[in-house]
Image (cartoon, grey):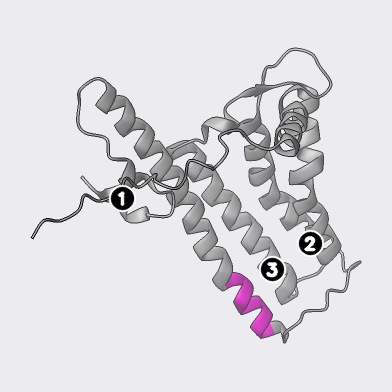
Amino acid sequence: MQLEPTPPITQGLQHIANEPPAWAESAGRVIHYLMIDFGGGRRWLKLAWVINFQKLATIPLFAIFLFKYQNFSAAAWIYTAMQSSYGLVWIVKDLAFPDPSFQRLATVGAGIATFLSVLGWYWVFGWLLISDIAKPRYPLPDYAWFSLQLSIQDPLAARVLCEDATRKRCLLASQMSSIGLGEWRAEDCSPIRCKSIGRN
C-alpha cells in the first residue's frame, strides 16, 4: 500500500495577502508617531521608563488616596491591591525579559502622550473610585464581582509573563541557532505555550 505524500501546510494559503490593509498601515503610522515622535525633538526617553514609572508610582499614589479620602472599603482596597500587584509583576517582567518594543527611544512629547492617552487612565479610575465620586454599579453582588475580578487578573498576569518569557527564549534560541549553537524549533515558540519556556 502506497501512501500519498502529505500536502505542505501552506497549501491553500497563497491567497492570503502579505501586505496589511491600508487602514492598518495608516493606524500604525499614527500610533508610531504618538508613541515615538510626538512633539518632535531628540529621542532620549525609553517608553519602558514611562511605563515603569506609572507602575511603581501607583502603589504610593493609591495609598495616599486611601488615607486622604478615608475610604477603606473592600472595593477601594481591592482595586489598590490589583493595580499595585500587577505593577510589581510588570516590573519583574521588565527586569527579567524586557519587551523590545518598549526599549525604543522616544521624544518627551511621545512619553507624555503615552502617559496621558493610556497609562494615566488607571490613576483616574482609581481616584474616581477611592474618592467616592463615582458610585459603581456592578452586574453581580459585590462579593461575586470582586471574586470574578481577582480570578481573572491572576491568569492575565501569568499570560503576560509567559508571553514575554517565551518571546525572549525564542529570540535567544534563534540567535544561538544562527551561530551553530543548538537547534531552533519554531513550533516551541507559540506565545501561549508556556510549557516551552522550560523545555530543553
Residue 108's place in the image compared with 76, above or below, is above
Q: Earlier in the sequence, mark 1 or mark 3?
A: 3
- Image coordinates of residue 8 in percent, x first then y, are 32, 45
Q: Which residue lies under the disc numbered 3?
A: 77
Residue at the farthest right position: 133
Report the disc number at residue 21: none
Residue at 37 percent across and 54 percent down: it is 194
User: Which of these two is toward me, 58 or 192?
Assistant: 192
Nearer to us of marks 2 and 3 is: 3
User: Which of these two is toward me, 123 or 25?
Assistant: 25
Residue type at tag 2: Phe
Left or right of residue 186, residue 121 in this image:
right
Left or right of residue 196, residue 66 in this image:
right
Q: Which residue lies under the disc numbered 1?
A: 196
Q: Check residue 163 for magenta coloring.
A: no
Residue type at tag 1: Ser
| Residues rendered magenta in the picture | 143-150
- Image coordinates of residue 15 in percent, x first then y, are 53, 42
Nearer to us of marks 2 and 1 is: 1
Report the disc number at residue 67: 2
In which quadrant is the N terminus drawn?
bottom left
Quadrant assignment, res 170:
top left
Q: Earlier in the sequence, mark 2 or mark 3?
A: 2
Q: For mark 1, does the 10 Å Cα neighbourhood hold few (<14), some (14 to 19), or many (20 or more) residues?
A: some
Left or right of residue 48, residue 130 in this image:
right
Q: For mark 2, does the 10 Å Cα neighbourhood hold few (<14), some (14 to 19), or many (20 or more) residues?
A: few
Nearer to us of marks 1 and 3 is: 1
Q: Check residue 145 for magenta coloring.
A: yes
What is the distance, in whole Å, between disc 2 and disc 1 at their CAs? 45 Å
